[in-house]
């Protein structure tokens, strides 16, 4: 098994980033937000959990990819200013949203699903349930509907009146960023290495675009998967036929990140990493990087033990969902329309 190289940053810089992020991470973000409660809407909007569930059932039944889209939306929300619905805001003359930031543009989906749920919830309980809470509940239901674990969702978030295009570009990990850079972005949010490996297991569902896996399949895929370069696997050759080596029209062609069970939330994603066949560089590095001593053991654990994966994924999702936007507690609101700040 060849070890992956780190891509963009010198090693020393990556270590420094990791230390800085750890120090900042433990100070800046309370990953266990004490102001959220499980029964927040029990008396003020008792129907909300049922409404979200029903709408998510329809969405996932019509296309299982919708589960992946909503789960990723929640992740991209929480990593920018905390889980405050900022990712849902559209660009206006006075506000630059996050939708056109590079990890999101032409890539994030599922906004209409959240709009639809919000409409239903507003007609039952006007002005009560935040978009950030709706997205958090919807992400939990998404996972459950495609076979993943259930967890209770702490509630009571407020929606932000701001978004951050800049933070969306810097805080969200990229597939070619290198293992330490990815870990440092999770530590910065108050999430551990264990949380990082467990949450990356979300890639057991959903797809990636050619632009995000080209470097991998024309790079060290053969090395990590122990392929004989003369007899390419059917999997690798099918990936190459979807994704030619040069940039162009095929950039948006897609492939499942878990080619074994693409629409099922299970632990086969980790088994794929053990075979060295991860689609994204960032995923494979958790197992194959020389620096991934701890991550490699976690990948092996989750590949062998689906119950341990489900348990840790649930715990880590609660932790990620509790990343707070402290400003929003004071200045936040319950948006009427998730795309716009209230007027
Ligand atoms: C560990 C660092 C991570 C990196 C580098 C990363 C990167 C990516 C990339 C590049 C894609 C494909 C996007 C595209 O090609 O348009 C993707 C898809 C996805 N990611 Fe991640 N991701 C990470 C962690 C997470 C986490 C923590 C979650 C949720 C808990 C998540 C959920 C998803 C889902 C569900 C998809 C599929 C979306 C769809 O099919 O529409 N990812 N991710």
Image (tube, grey):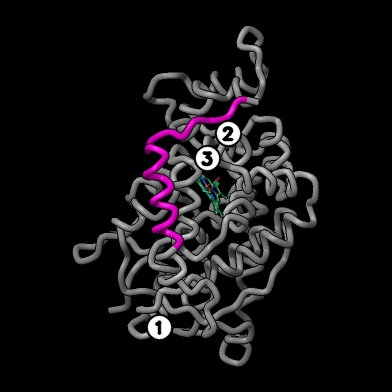
**What numbered label is drawn on residue 314?**
none
Q: CA distance from mark 1 to mark 2?
A: 39 Å
Residue 209 in the figure: left or right of residue 272: left
Quarter of the figure with residue 293:
top right
Figure check: 320 above or below 256: below
Q: Name the one closer to the observer, 133 or 281.
A: 281
Figure check: 166 above or below 327: above
Instruction: Where is residue 62? Give x, y as percent.
Output: 64, 51
Q: Secondary structure at mark 3?
A: helix
State the residue position of label 1.
329
Figure check: 331 above or below 54: below
State the residue position of label 3.
282
Instruction: Where is residue 310? Give x, y as percent.
Output: 73, 58
Count residues near mark 2 (Cα–Cα under 10 Å), then give few for <14, some for 14-19, many for 20+. Answer: many
Instruction: Where is residue 190? Give x, y as percent.
Output: 50, 66
Does 213 appear in magenta?
A: no
Part of the protein shown in magenta: 2-22
Count residues near mark 3 (Cα–Cα under 10 Å), then give few for <14, some for 14-19, many for 20+. Answer: many
Figure check: 42 above or below 288: below
**Cβ of mark 3 under 8 A from ligand 1:** yes
Q: CA distance from mark 1 to mark 3?
A: 34 Å
Count residues near mark 1 (Cα–Cα under 10 Å), then give few for <14, some for 14-19, many for 20+. Answer: some
Residue 123 in the figure: left or right of residue 62: left
- Residue at (41%, 74%) from the top-left corner? 325
Q: Is residue 63 visible?
A: no
Q: N-terminal of the two: label 1 or label 2?
A: 2
Q: Secondary structure at mark 1?
A: helix
Q: CA distance from mark 2 to mark 3?
A: 9 Å
Residue 104 in the figure: left or right of residue 123: left
User: How many tags in the picture?
Assistant: 3
Q: Quadrant of the N terminus?
A: top right
Q: Nearer the viewer, mark 2 or mark 3?
A: 3
């Amino acid at each position: 098994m060849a070890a992956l190289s780190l891509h963009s940053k010198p090693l020393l810089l990556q270590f420094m980033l990791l230390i800085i992020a750890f120090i900042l991470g433990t100070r800046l973000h309370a990953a266990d937000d004490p102001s959220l409660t499980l029964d927040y809407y029990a008396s003020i909007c008792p129907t909300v959990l049922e409404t979200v569930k029903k709408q998510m059932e329809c969405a996932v039944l019509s296309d299982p990819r919708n589960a992946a889209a909503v789960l990723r939306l929640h992740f991209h929300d929480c990593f920018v200013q905390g889980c405050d619905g900022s990712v849902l805001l559209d660009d206006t003359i006075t506000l630059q949203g996050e939708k056109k930031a590079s990890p999101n543009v032409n890539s994030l989906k599922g906004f209409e699903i959240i709009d639809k749920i919000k409409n239903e919830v507003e007609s039952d309980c006007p002005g009560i349930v935040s978009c950030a809470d709706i997205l958090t509940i919807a992400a939990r239901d998404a996972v459950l509907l495609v076979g993943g674990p259930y967890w209770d969702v702490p509630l009571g978030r407020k929606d932000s009146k701001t978004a951050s295009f800049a933070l969306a570009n810097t805080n969200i990990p990229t597939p070619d960023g290198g293992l330490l850079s990815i870990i440092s972005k999770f530590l910065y949010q108050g999430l551990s290495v264990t949380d990082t490996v467990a949450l990356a297991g979300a890639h057991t569902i959903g797809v990636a675009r050619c632009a995000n896996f080209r470097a991998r399949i024309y790079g060290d895929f053969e090395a990590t998967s122990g392929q004989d370069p003369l007899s390419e696997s059917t999997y690798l050759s099918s990936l190459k036929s979807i994704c030619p080596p040069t940039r162009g029209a095929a950039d948006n062609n897609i492939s499942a990140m878990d080619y074994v069970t693409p629409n099922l939330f299970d632990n086969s994603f980790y088994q794929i990493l053990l075979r060295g066949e991860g689609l994204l560089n960032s995923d494979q590095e958790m197992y194959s990087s020389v620096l991934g001593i701890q991550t490699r053991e976690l990948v092996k654990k989750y590949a062998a033990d689906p119950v341990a994966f489900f348990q840790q994924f649930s715990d880590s999702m609660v932790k990620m969902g509790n990343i707070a936007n402290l400003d929003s507690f004071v200045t936040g609101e319950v948006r009427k329309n998730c795309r716009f700040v209230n007027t």
